[in-house]
Image (cartoon, rainbow, N blue to C red):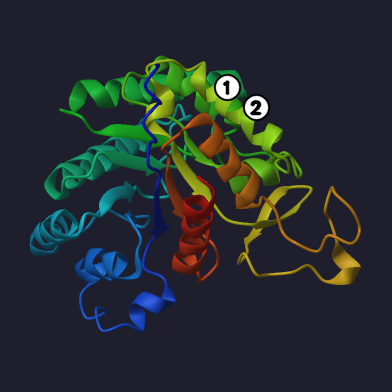
C-alpha cells in the first residue's frame, strides 16, 4: 500500500505588532512579540523596517533568542523607499545598501526572508524589469546572502511597478528571489480577481512555473481590501462590511463582504498540501485575522 503523503504545515502570523500586543503585558519591549505570539497560538512575525533598518544590537539579539525559544518564524519587511526599476544611480545604490542592511539584520536574528516593494520605475515596464533584475543580481554579488531569500512584493496600485507579472519575471531571473504574494494587492490591482478557489489556483500555478521549488517558499500577505479603479484603497478587517450604497462585489449586490476571503484560498492550500507562510495585514487586527485563518485551516485540513 502506498504511504499517504505527509501533511505539510502552513504558518500563520502578523505584520508588525497589532494593537492587542501594545495592550498586553509584553508591550514594554518589541522583542517580546515572539512570546506574545506563542501565547495566543500564532507562528510568525514579519518585522516592519519600512522606514529604515535601524534595530539596536541588543534588540536583535533578544529577537533571535525569543524567536528560537518560542518557535516563531521571523521575516523582515525592508524599507518602502527601495526602488529597483530605476536608472537613477543614486537611488539604485541606496536601494542595494538598504537590502544589504536588511540581509545583515536577518542573519543577526536568524531570519531567512526579506520582503520589499519593487518601488518606482524608469521608462517602460520591460525596461524597469530589466533594471530591477540587474539591481538584485548586483546585490547578490555584493552581499553574502547565505540562505536568506529576497521576496519582491506585488504592488497594490494599477500603475505601480510590481504587477504579478513583474514580480514573476524578476524571480525567474534572480537566484535568491521568490514572489511575495500580497493577494489583496493582486485582487485590488486586477479589480476584484480573487473570489473562487480556482482564481487562487491560477496564481499558484503561475508561481510554480518560476521553478526552483518556488511552492516551498510561498510568502503570502492576506487581508480584505477596499479598492477603486486605481487599485488598492484601504486595508480592511475580516469583519468589515460594505455600506449598502457602495457594494463592489463581483458575486451579487447582496454580498457586503470585502474580498479576498481566506476560505477558498485555504481550501486550495489544503487540497494542494501547501505550506505557505501567511502574514495577516488586516487593519488593526492582524492577530485576530491570523487566528481566524489558522482556526479555519485546522478545522478543515
Is residue 223 something one can see in this rendering? yes
Res 206 label: 1
Q: Residues within 10 Å of mark 2 (few under 14, many from 20)?
A: few
Up-down relation of residue 226 to residue 31 (above or below): above
Is residue 128 something one can see in this rendering? no
Q: Quadrant of residue 95?
A: top left
Q: Quadrant of the N terminus?
A: top left
Of 141 and 234, the residue lying toward us: 234
Up-down relation of residue 44 to residue 237 (above or below): above
127 on left or right of 218: right
Of 3 and 36, the residue lying toward us: 3
Q: CA distance from mark 1 to mark 2?
A: 6 Å
Q: Give the tally of numbered discs.
A: 2
Helix, strand or loop at disc 1? Answer: helix
Residue at point 61% right, 48% down? 184
Helix, strand or loop at disc 2? Answer: helix
Up-down relation of residue 250 to residue 19 (above or below): above
Q: Residues within 10 Å of mark 1 (few under 14, many from 20)?
A: few
Residue 121 picture location, percent across and down: 54, 32
Residue 132 picture location, percent across and down: 44, 25
Residue at point 31% right, 49% down? 76
Residue bearing the label numbered 2:
202
Of 96 and 238, the residue lying toward us: 238
Residue 274 picture location, percent across and down: 45, 34
Res 72 label: none
Q: Quadrant of residue 282?
A: bottom right
41 on left or right of 252: left
Residue 7 picture location, percent across and down: 39, 35
Marks 1 & 2, CB-CB < 8 Å contact: yes
Amino acid at each position: 500500500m502506498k504511504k499517504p503523503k505527509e501533511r505539510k504545515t502552513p504558518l500563520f502570523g502578523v505584520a508588525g505588532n497589532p494593537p492587542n500586543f501594545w495592550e498586553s503585558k509584553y508591550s514594554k519591549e518589541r522583542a517580546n512579540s515572539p512570546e506574545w505570539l506563542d501565547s495566543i497560538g500564532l507562528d510568525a512575525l514579519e518585522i516592519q523596517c519600512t522606514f529604515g533598518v535601524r534595530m539596536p544590537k541588543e534588540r536583535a539579539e533578544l529577537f533571535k533568542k525569543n524567536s528560537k525559544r518560542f518557535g516563531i518564524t521571523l521575516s523582515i519587511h525592508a524599507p518602502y523607499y527601495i526602488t529597483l526599476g530605476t536608472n537613477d544611480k543614486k537611488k539604485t545604490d541606496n536601494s542595494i545598501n538598504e537590502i544589504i542592511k536588511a540581509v545583515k539584520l536577518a542573519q543577526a536574528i536568524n531570519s531567512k526572508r526579506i520582503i520589499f516593494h519593487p518601488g518606482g520605475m524608469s521608462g517602460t515596464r520591460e525596461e524597469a524589469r530589466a533594471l530591477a533584475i540587474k539591481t538584485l543580481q548586483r546585490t547578490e554579488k555584493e552581499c553574502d546572502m547565505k540562505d536568506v531569500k529576497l521576496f519582491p512584493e506585488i504592488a497594490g496600485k494599477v500603475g505601480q511597478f510590481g504587477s504579478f507579472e513583474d514580480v514573476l519575471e524578476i524571480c525567474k531571473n534572480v537566484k535568491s528571489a521568490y514572489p511575495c504574494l500580497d493577494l489583496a494587492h493582486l485582487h485590488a490591482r486586477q479589480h476584484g480577481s480573487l473570489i473562487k478557489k480556482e482564481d487562487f489556483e491560477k496564481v499558484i500555478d503561475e508561481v510554480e512555473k518560476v521553478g526552483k521549488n518556488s511552492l516551498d517558499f510561498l510568502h503570502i500577505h492576506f487581508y480584505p481590501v477596499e479598492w477603486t479603479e486605481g487599485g488598492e484603497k484601504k486595508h480592511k478587517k475580516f469583519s468589515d462590511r460594505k455600506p449598502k450604497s457602495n457594494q463592489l462585489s463581483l458575486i451579487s449586490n447582496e454580498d457586503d463582504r470585502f474580498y479576498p476571503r481566506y476560505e477558498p484560498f485555504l481550501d486550495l492550500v489544503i487540497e494542494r498540501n501547501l505550506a505557505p507562510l501567511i502574514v495577516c495585514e488586516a487593519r488593526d487586527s492582524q492577530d485576530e485575522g491570523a487566528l481566524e485563518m489558522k482556526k479555519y485551516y485546522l478545522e478543515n485540513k
